[in-house]
Image: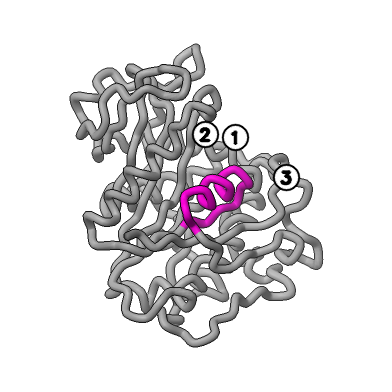
Amino acid sequence: MLYRLIRRGIPSLIQKAKASAEVNYTPIKHVKKCDDGFYRKANPLVDGTVLIRKLKSKTGREIDYVLATPEDRNLIATYASEGYAQSNSCCAHYKVTAAELECIAVPSVDQMLENGKIFCAYDGDKLIAVMLNSFNYEDKFEEMFNGEMPGMKDPKFIVKEDYAEEFNNQPFTPGINYYVTMLDALQPQTGKFLPAGIKGFGITEGGIVHQEYQKEGIFPVMVDLAEKAFKEKDIHHVGGYCVATGSQKIFRRRGFKSLYILHYDDFKVNGKPVYSNLSDGATCCDVMVKVLK
C-alpha cells in the first residue's frame, strides 16, 4: 500500500500536484518497543473512540478496534515507519530503514489525523495493526490530479521510458527516491480514470498488520471500518495503490477493480528496472478502485 497527498519541499519535475513525502516535517518522539516485539499503549480504550470491542480473531483472540487521536501520533508514526521498512517489498528491496521512511510515514500520519481516519487494532495493550485512510473532495481534484479531471474520455496511463531525471531530483536517500518517484508517476493519473461528477474520492493509504497477526483476519475488519467511514463522509469511490501481492489479493476479494497497472519491468531508472525479483513476488503496482453502494 502507498502513502500519498503530502506536499514536500522539492517538487517532482513531472508532477505539480501532490507528492508522497516531506522534507521538512515535525519530528516525532520515538516510542520504545517492548522486549516481546510489540509497541504498547497503556489505555487504548480510554484515549480513543472504541469502534469494536473484543471481536474474536480467527484463532479466538479478542481484538479491540479503536479510532486514533492526535495523541497517538508518535506511536502510530513509529509503528508505521518500522512496519513498512519490514513489510513493503519495494522498500525492503533497497534495505530502506525505518528512520529513512519517516519522511513518508510521519507527514502521512499527520495528514490522516487531520483529514481522514486512522484505525488501530489492539490485543490488550499491544498495538497489532494500523490503517490510514484519507478523505478527498472535488475542490482539491484540480491540484490532486494535476489537472487531469474525472470524466476524461478514453483515459490512458502514461509510463515514461525512463525516470532518471525524476529520481535525481528527489532529495531523499536512494531507496526512498525510487519509491517516491514511482508514487509521483502513479498517483496524479488516477483522476482521469474516475467518472465525471464524483464529489469525493477516498483512499486507503496504508495498512500494516504485525507479523504475528497477519493470518488472524485483522485487515478485512479494518477495510470494513474504512468503507463505513467513507460512506459516512458521502464518499463512494475508494482507491488503493497496491504494491504488494498480498494487498492486491485482499482488495480483489473485497470487490476492488483495476484502473491501471504499472508493471515493474516498465519502471526504469537509467535504463534498468527499479524493482525486480521482489521478496513477495510482486511484479506490478495495481491501482484499484471500488464503488461503495
Residue type, label 1: Gln
Q: Are marks 1 and 2 in contact (CB under 8 Å)?
A: yes
- Which residue extends farthest top? 35
**267 left or right of 36?**
right
Q: What is the x, y in percent for residue 281?
A: 72, 45
Q: How far separated are the C-alphas under marks 3 and 1?
A: 15 Å
Q: How far separated are the C-alphas under marks 1 and 2?
A: 6 Å
For label 1, the crowd category at 10 Å Cα-Cα, with few meaning under 14, some 14 to 19 and many 20 or more, is: some
Residue at position x 27%, y 50% from top?
A: 229
Residue at position x 50%, y 25% from top?
A: 213
Residue that numbered label 1 is attached to: 86
SS class of the residue under badge 1? helix
SS class of the residue under badge 3? loop
Q: Which residues are magenta?
A: 240-256
Residue at position x 45%, y 37% from top?
A: 219
Residue that numbered label 2 is attached to: 82
